[in-house]
Amino acid sequence: MTSSETAGRRGRRPGDSQTRTAILEAARVRFAHDGFRAATVRAIAADAGVDPALVMHYFGTKQGLFVAAMEFPLDPAQIVPRIVGPGIDGLGERLVRFLLGLVDELGEANPMLALVRSAVGHPDAARMMREFLGEAILDRVAAAVDADRPRLRADLCASQIVGILMARQVLALPELAAADREILIQVYGRTIQRYLTEPLESPAASR
Amino acid sequence: MTSSETAGRRGRRPGDSQTRTAILEAARVRFAHDGFRAATVRAIAADAGVDPALVMHYFGTKQGLFVAAMEFPLDPAQIVPRIVGPGIDGLGERLVRFLLGLVDELGEANPMLALVRSAVGHPDAARMMREFLGEAILDRVAAAVDADRPRLRADLCASQIVGILMARQVLALPELAAADREILIQVYGRTIQRYLTEPLESPAASR
């Protein structure tokens, strides 16, 4: 974003985009340094020299600010309820269908890869991602679970989803990268569904 | 480094460790540059100024050389047959039990994390890992599979295993990091077992 670009909505003044840029820059620094949870909108606003109400006006929530600062292509606050909303039935398949569609569409430009990259290299970035993923996605998925240990179940799902990203996009394992998307949706969808619903504690009984 | 240095386990001469170091250094450069598959023992030996027979004498195979060069704590050529050998029954559980034991034992010093780190950041490193993992682990697992598309099944397993590493070690998702190892062995073991055995193509029929 250059300072000559005026933000798209109607009636914004030329200074708006500079203000937004300053807020986003301050947010990136704060989130990286303090983590997602400890960073406050108040502190970010102060760093950017603006009123906290203006930050909320632009970005709605701290999550919205994070999404904009990290240049996510999508806001989990919008996507997750759409996938989780219809209920636990078929949730695994909906989740994997959405994810693989997104991954294939974004290709190399996938910003999730940049985030994985930085999380792998930097403990602070890993903490930031853990806290954001937890609040924006995993707690929301856990809330839809009707079984014991809902958040562990959401974490199990996350472990398979991150693994899909790594194995299909980063390592590009040959058969997995070439596999028909519909087969993967069914296979991984069943795994996610089981993580959300199957008994965890009595494995012997469930075989 | 001269080629007159001979190896011999007992009675190694002082020059031996310098020769080994030169070979390992040459191997790291070649593997990173050419990938695991295209790099030859002959070329690595030439780079190190030694006879190829000496490389084989020290390291046994190209895989063994790779394992030594990357400072793996274990050699897949030894471990994988031990896990796969008893057959497909219980393979998922054996694999996850071994992996989680290793991961917990190694902790922060886990060299797999360094490899993931470099694979995520560098396409050449990703290719090197893909080729080595394929030949040293995934093809061996696939060979034990008694179902259609054995290598796709091995790749599916790899995607969950890399995901465990990422979610439990790198992101350290809280419930997953704190979960009882035995529960994870059972839950993930079932997933791996299904990837190795369940029908892939007729998902509707298998539900």
Image (tube, coloured by chain):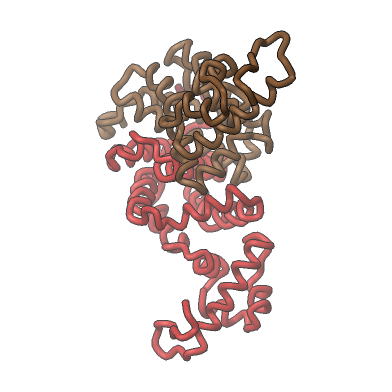
Chain colours: A red, B brown
Where is the N terminus of chain B found, in terms of image quarters? top right
In the image, farthest residue toward the top: B10
Q: Is residue B77 above or below residue B173?
A: above
Name the residue: 49% across, 47% down: B122
Q: Is residue B48 above or below residue A105?
A: above
Q: Is residue B86 above or below residue B45?
A: above
The image quarter in which residue B166 lies: top right
Residue B119 makes an appearance in the image? yes
For residue B84, side relative to residue B28 (left or right): left
Number of labels in the image equals 0
Name the residue: 57% across, 29% down: B48
Residue A98, position as x, y percentages in the image: 36, 51
Residue B46, position as x, y percentages in the image: 51, 27
The answer to which of B142 and B164 lies nearer the viewer is B142
Where is the C terminus of chain B found, in terms of image quarters? top left
Residue A44, position as x, y percentages in the image: 64, 73
Residue A80, position as x, y percentages in the image: 44, 56
The image quarter in which residue A180 lies: top left
The answer to which of B161 and A2 lies nearer the viewer is A2
For residue B23, side relative to residue B108 (left or right): left
Name the residue: 48% across, 10% down: B86
The image quarter in which residue A45 lies: bottom right
Residue B159 makes an appearance in the image? no
Name the residue: 62% across, 36% down: B179
